[in-house]
Image: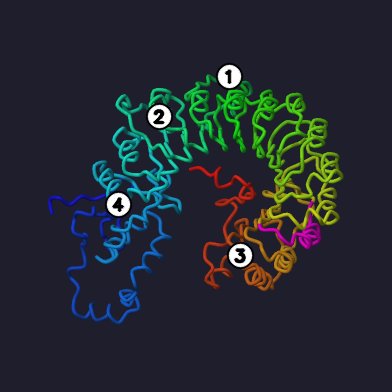
Amino acid sequence: MESKRTLLTGGQGTIRRPSHINNTISSEDDDQFVETDEFDDLTESNVERRRSSRVFSLRFLPDKIFLLIFSYLTPLDLIHCTHVCQRWHHLISRHSSLWRRLFLRPDCSNGQIGAVHVRRLDVFLHALATRFSSSLIYIDLPIELITVEVLRELAIRCPNLEYLTLDFSSAMQLHDFSELNEFPCNLKRLCICLSDVIFLEGFMRRIYAFLSSLHTLHIIGTLEKSSLTSTSPEETDEYETININRIKAHAPNLHTINLYGVSFIDDSHIEAIASGCIHLQCLALNFCTRVKGTSFKNLMNRCQKVTCLLLQNTGIQDEPMLAVNWSTTQLSELDISSTDLSERALVDFFSMVPKLTYLAVPFCDGFTDAVLNLLLDRGKLNGCRALDLSHTVNLNVDAVHRLLTSFTNISYRLEALSYTGHAAITERFWIDSIRYLHRIKILIMGTAHSWFKQATRRIHIDQILEACAVHCPYLKRLEIQWDPETLRFSENSSKFIDHVRVRCTNLSSFVLSDGPYYEGAKANFERAERHGIVRTTTMYQTSIVSNLSFYNEMKFN
């Protein structure tokens, strides 16, 4: 009993199940010991009652069925299951294939990924060697677990580890890495969350030699403290807490780079990437406000495989963008949301780019009728799968209606469409347009805070749902942003909700503003045992980014 070692989970203390069983998981040398607090007082009548229950019949299921069920559970759920019985404890502890992903950052514990909080480092190191070992392919480490001992154990015990997240965002000081000589050397993806006050060069110098296998690199900045809050770069002191030049020199095989909200990134860093990453295919610079676009000419000349550029909320300017000969590139996916490009620049720019399969231009004031008409007339959107035209205040509603109803070669191919933020849109616009969206999977419509934007009339939601039920059999995600003051529905609304629920069998998310209609739709789906489908706009936001060809590589955190 003295040799028993436990991996405790929880925030400030141990998480407890309703039966007050401690959430501990024993190591394999404990002879399948399971802690229980309340099972010793089972009476004979209780035993008979358990035998007659349906739960007791689970004992007749074969192990392979249990293992299949367990494979869908999060690490935290697996730890809970070890306390059910000795058989479950044995199955979960002895089959390392169940522990392919491990989430260890406490900030993730409220989500659905099942984060585990490590209370004892020695037990965690033992679990790496015995329980996870060669099956582990993903792990994220908070700052307290980014130590020489943990990284050495991962390098030795987990040869198949492919995805590693190192979260330095809350760090005030680093551990001593002077003796770090081992690091996972077969990584395909590396995510580093930066700190505003910690320089990582001392740590990075010890791991540069192990990065040659990287294909995807995420460097996540401190967005909430970045220069987004300032009017000019001189107003804030931005420190280069990580050396981008050294990373690209030691990771020549990178094909996806995501620099999200890194406030010190500018065009000089993009020049460095262009000089060393000839295999680059996707570059994401979202919220890197210091990037003006002067480096894009060299980037597109040297990295000729680039097909995806994500430039949301960057500082790109007209002249640098027009200096690139876009007609010779392979660009097919583009996001210029919340940028200040002018109408003239966009007309010239889109006249050069090849055909686009993904285009996002929300909050882009320069995107006007003239720009959209050019894209249509020249066939630039003929193969488009995903389109986001939200909050384009200078784009006329009639131009979008013409796109969706007259250019059926485009609307038939659309799999994702977002068009929100226009108070003048009525239900007739969507009823006419939805008829041509036969392949649509993601559909986002409406205007949040319609009362503030003075919507011209109330929206009758029933006919919109009926159109979706009839014409959109592949619909997976539907978001309707109109607030309760704008939505209008009849006493028979439940019938139209039924049609959507029955006919759109793939529907996994139905987002509505909180109000009477949301409550009715939620109750309708829950009566049909489809829980968690109907959600509120205050808790969930739908996006078309899942239609990016590099979506799986771009996911982080």
Report the residue marked by disc 2.
Answer: 207
Is 428 one of the magenta-colored residues? yes
Mark 3, other Cα within 10 Å: few <14 / some 14–19 / many ≥20? some
Q: Is mark 1 on a helix, strand or loop?
A: helix
Q: Does residue 202 sit above or below 7 in this rendering?
A: above
Please report whichever mark, 2 or 1, sits nearer to the chain's N-terminal start.
2
Q: Quadrant of residue 148?
A: top left
Please report whichever mark, 3 or 4, sits nearer to the chain's N-terminal start.
4
Give the spatial CA distance, label 1 vs label 3.
Answer: 50 Å
Three-letter amino acid code at disc 1?
A: Glu
Q: Which mark, by number, is residue 506? A: 3
Using residue 111 as the reference point, say whether residue 144 is left or right of it.
Answer: left
Give the spatial CA distance, label 2 vs label 3.
Answer: 44 Å
Q: Is mark 3 on a helix, strand or loop?
A: loop
Q: Is mark 2 on a helix, strand or loop?
A: helix
- On the image, the x and y values in percent for residue 468 come to 71, 64
